[in-house]
């Protein structure tokens, strides 16, 4: 029934053909240290592990050493970039 309703004049035939002919782009493999990962779930695990190893919790910003470092960096930045 759907095919009978398609008309070249109203672009419905062209629209349906584009939908049918569209081939999804496969996700490329993920290359990690010594491994090639193909499945989406394994890729997600590898990315999560990588991000976890790269990012650590920040120090408590109320520590005096941290406040001093931020203050010095901010003053230096404002001297270079007054606007």
Image (cartoon, rainbow, N blue to C red):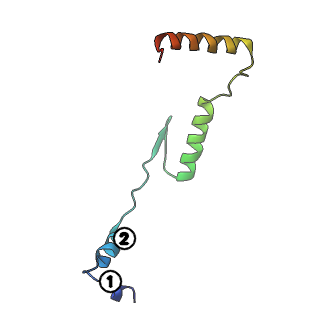
Give the structural element (helix, strand or loop) at label 1. Answer: loop
Q: Residues within 10 Å of mark 2 (few under 14, many from 20)?
A: few
Residue at 71%, 21% in the rendered image: 61
Q: Seen in the image, is 4 located left or right of residue 37?
A: left
The image quadrant of residue 70 is top right
Q: Nearer the viewer, mark 1 or mark 2?
A: 1
Nearest to the observer: residue 5 or residue 55: 5
CB atoms of marks 1 and 2 within 8 Å: no
Residue at 45%, 47% in the rendered image: 29
Residue wearing tag 2: 19
Nearest to the observer: residue 68 or residue 3: 68
Q: Is residue 36 above or below residue 78?
A: below
- Outermost residue to the left: 9
Q: Residues within 10 Å of mark 1 (few under 14, many from 20)?
A: some
Q: Position of residue 53 (x, y in %)?
A: 61, 31
Q: Seen in the image, is 78 located left or right of residue 21?
A: right
Q: Position of residue 13 (x, y in %)?
A: 30, 78
Q: Which mark is residue 6?
A: 1
Residue at 53%, 52% in the rendered image: 40
Q: Which mark is residue 38?
A: none
Q: Seen in the image, is 40 located left or right of residue 57?
A: left
Residue at 41%, 55% in the rendered image: 26
Nearest to the observer: residue 29 or residue 64: 64
């Amino acid at each position: 029934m759907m095919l009978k309703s398609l008309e070249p004049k109203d672009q419905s035939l062209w629209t349906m053909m584009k939908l049918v002919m569209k081939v999804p782009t496969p996700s490329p493999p993920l290359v990690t240290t010594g491994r090639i990962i193909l499945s989406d779930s394994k890729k997600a695990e590898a990315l999560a592990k990588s991000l976890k190893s790269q990012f650590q919790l920040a120090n408590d910003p109320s520590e005096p050493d941290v406040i001093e470092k931020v203050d010095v960096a901010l003053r230096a930045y404002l001297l270079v970039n007054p606007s």
